Amino acid sequence: QKEVEQNSGPLSVPEGAIASLNCTYSDRGSQSFFWYRQYSGKSPELIMSIYSNGDKEDGRFTAQLNKASQYVSLLIRDSQPSDSATYLCAANTGKLIFGQGTTLQVKP
Amino acid sequence: EADIYQTPRYLVIGTGKKITLECSQTMGHDKMYWYQQDPGMELHLIHYSYGVNSTEKGDLSSESTVSRIRTEHFPLTLESARPSHTSQYLCASSEVEGEQYFGPGTRLTVT
């Protein structure tokens, strides 16, 4: 079992819809969680961090953390074609462990 | 804005050559990392450093070595390049564990 698991996708949503990206982790000692966005051919870019249970909102992005279920999610509201990218979930277990990423396609 | 630089951006080199990939950051971050990523594949941590004169190997076995003599500089060296080393190499730095800033990457091709 991988330490951080994501469905590789692709996840396809129409423009304007809500995209929901999910991630599970195995180490209950994980303290903090991060979402990175990686456009094709580019480097990852940090877009959200979440440190405690519940929701954290930043513009069109909402990160959700449920430590009891070992589950992290990222919601993107009003999805735009420019959101099309691979989204990497990462857990801090003392060092940062990345998932394999979910590819999101937003269709106009 | 994060200021982390990698040179060269692209490198094509023959088997057996020694190469050094440069990474520099101007943010004063103590933590620096090297990752390897093949197209469409996962990030693999190959080396990291939590400060000057501190280096550790990551999860992916690598024939490369690193040094950290100055806070801002974290070069990666391959003593003898092989075609299996062909990949994208990404450098990152952070102040807070998890909040990493990535450089633009070096795409290495070994012929």
Image (cartoon, coloured by chain):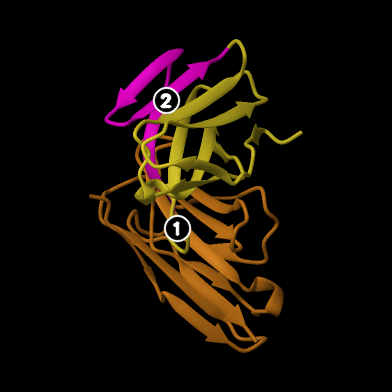
Crowding at mark 2 (Cα within 10 Å: few <14, some 14-19, many 20+): many
Residue B31 in view here: no
When the figure is inspected, residue B91 is found, relative to residue B97, above or below; the finding is below
Q: Colour of chain B?
A: orange
| Residue B60 visible in the current orientation | yes
Q: Is residue A63 left or right of residue B1?
A: right
Whether A59 is among the magenta residues is: yes
**Stretch of the chain drawn in magenta:** A44-67
Q: Look at the image and say whether residue B58 sits in the magenta stretch.
A: no
Numbered tag placed on residue A63 in the rendering? 2
Residue at 37%, 39% (x, y): give it: A79
Q: Colour of chain A?
A: yellow
Query: In what element is the residue under mark 1?
Result: strand
Identify residue for label 1: B91
x and y percentages locating residue A18 in the rendered image:
42, 31
* Mark 2 secondary-structure assignment: strand
- Going 45% across and 36% down the picture, which residue do you hit? A35
Residue B28: image location, x then y, percent:
27, 48
Where is residue A17? Give x, y as percent: 41, 34
Q: What amino acid is at disc 2?
A: Ala
Toward the viewer: B49 or A22? A22
The chain holding disc 2 is A
At a point 58% along the width and 59% down the height, the residue shown is B37
Q: Residue at x 70, y 56 (%)?
A: B61
